[in-house]
């Protein structure tokens, strides 16, 4: 998708997938945080117009509706802070947010403040978060530019200082791989986004590895900024263009909930969305069952490393922190491995306390090739 010039543009399928992911995550995030805090904040640096060409809601409206539902259950307050540079889009966004508000009862909407600002997101967004006291309280920041890289590391660093902040950044790797090697200004943009120059090793990588290399470098950037857990979700649009959504949190619960959302959007692999019009990907889309073969092999190796075996709880935590998979997928996989004689369980019935050990003579299953699937 080329960067649109109109104030309101057509929503493409991968944007719909992004919205699906955001909605599912916020539906988990808001109630969890509202149950324990009096006020929480949602912010966007690149809010858009709040609506797409055929009336589909933009991310601020989607988030607003989720928050109204959550506030109906909890007598708490929420702030929504939105930045948008384009004045036509800002005006439309104001209209859309008023419309969203008008659909809900005052006793809820009055507890949900919306602050819309027109202008460059940086440093205005950070200043706003600081002056309102939102930094330091539970905060979700969506930085959904057209892919940039647009987000200065300095901003991520400030956000990452606060334990209860989470971020989701849209990152498009092709700008850097195509244009930055021979252009000082573009390279500098990369340096500002990554916070160092390590990413420039991408120029020496073979082409098929370049995007994944930048994605992993960017996750490392988020970790350096303080977000100890990161996940990525990849989206390929109808023209084959790759965009990554990169999520950072300091909470295992946030990690778990984001994985849940990702597996709902991509039931087979949990990490990607392919535009149906991208014909090269259609074969892959035929697979409907979750592909847990890599998880089996990773668990098998992890169990084999410990002579006394591992409990199911340990395996679930390993899956959460070290793989793309969810803790809830572990028991089914352990049961299959036990029934095939690859592992033994004690006791036979499987629950979180069950100990899993390698079977005496496990059937040979070839070398593990799954390290690349680690998130
Ligand atoms: C991908 S769109 C956002 C879409 C929106 N998050 C949604 O999902 O509905 C990116 C938006 O960022 C705005 N934008 C671009 N540069 C900006 C900047 N420096 N500061 C604030 N907004 C900017 C663009 O005008 C555009 O509306």
Image (cartoon, rainbow, N blue to C red):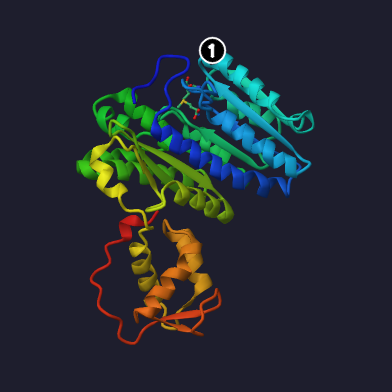
Q: Residue furthest left?
A: 206
Residue 129 in sight: yes
In screen coordinates, is 364 left or right of 295?
Answer: left
How crowded pointer 1 is (Cα within 10 Å; few <14, some 14-19, many 20+) is rated as: some
Residue 205 in sight: no
Residue at image x 41%, y 48%? 266
Choose between 197 and 296: the one closer to the eye: 296
In screen coordinates, is 54 left or right of 294?
Answer: right
Q: Position of residue 352 (x, y in %)?
A: 55, 73
Residue at image x 62%, y 43%? 162
Q: Which residue is mark 1?
A: 87
In screen coordinates, is 320 left or right of 296?
Answer: right
> What secondary structure is found at the residue carrying circle 1?
helix
Q: Position of residue 110 (x, y in %)?
A: 77, 29
Q: Position of residue 12 (x, y in %)?
A: 39, 29
Residue at image x 50%, y 63%? 328
Residue 98, image quadrant? top right
Q: Is residue 263 above or below residue 110?
A: below
Q: Is residue 366 above or below residue 94?
A: below
């Amino acid at each position: 998708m080329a960067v649109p010039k109109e104030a309101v543009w057509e929503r493409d399928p991968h944007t719909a997938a992004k919205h699906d992911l955001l909605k599912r995550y916020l539906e988990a995030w808001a109630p969890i945080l509202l149950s324990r805090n009096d006020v929480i904040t949602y912010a966007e640096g690149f809010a858009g117009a709040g609506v797409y060409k055929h009336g589909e809601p933009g991310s601020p409206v989607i988030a607003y509706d989720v928050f109204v539902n959550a506030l109906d259950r909890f007598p708490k307050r929420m702030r929504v802070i939105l930045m948008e540079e384009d004045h036509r889009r800002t005006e439309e966004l104001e209209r859309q947010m008023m419309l969203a508000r008008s659909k809900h009862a005052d006793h809820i909407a009055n507890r949900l403040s919306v602050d819309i600002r027109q202008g460059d997101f940086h440093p205005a967004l950070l200043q706003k978060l600081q002056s309102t006291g939102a930094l330091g309280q539970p905060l979700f920041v969506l930085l959904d530019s057209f892919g940039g890289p647009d987000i200065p590391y300095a901003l991520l660093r400030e956000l990452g200082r606060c334990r209860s902040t989470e971020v989701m950044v849209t990152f498009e790797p092709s700008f850097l791989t195509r244009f930055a090697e021979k252009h000082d200004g573009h390279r500098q943009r990369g340096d500002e986004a990554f916070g160092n120059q390590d990413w420039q090793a991408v120029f020496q990588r073979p082409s098929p590895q370049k995007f994944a290399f930048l994605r992993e470098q960017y996750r490392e950037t988020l970790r350096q900024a303080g977000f100890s857990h990161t996940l990525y979700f990849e989206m390929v649009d109808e023209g084959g263009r790759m965009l990554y959504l990169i999520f950072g949190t300091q909470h295992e619960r946030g990690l778990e909930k984001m994985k849940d959302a990702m597996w709902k959007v991509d039931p087979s692999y949990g990490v990607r969305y392919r535009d149906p019009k991208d014909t090269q990907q259609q074969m892959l889309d035929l697979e409907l069952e979750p592909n847990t073969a890599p998880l089996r092999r990773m668990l098998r190796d992890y169990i084999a490393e410990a002579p006394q075996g591992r409990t199911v709880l340990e395996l679930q935590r390993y899956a959460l922190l070290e793989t793309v998979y969810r803790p809830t997928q572990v028991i089914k996989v352990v049961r299959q491995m036990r029934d095939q004689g690859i592992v033994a369980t004690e006791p036979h019935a499987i629950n979180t306390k069950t100990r899993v050990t390698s079977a005496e003579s496990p059937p040979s299953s070839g070398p593990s090739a799954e390290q690349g699937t680690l998130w």
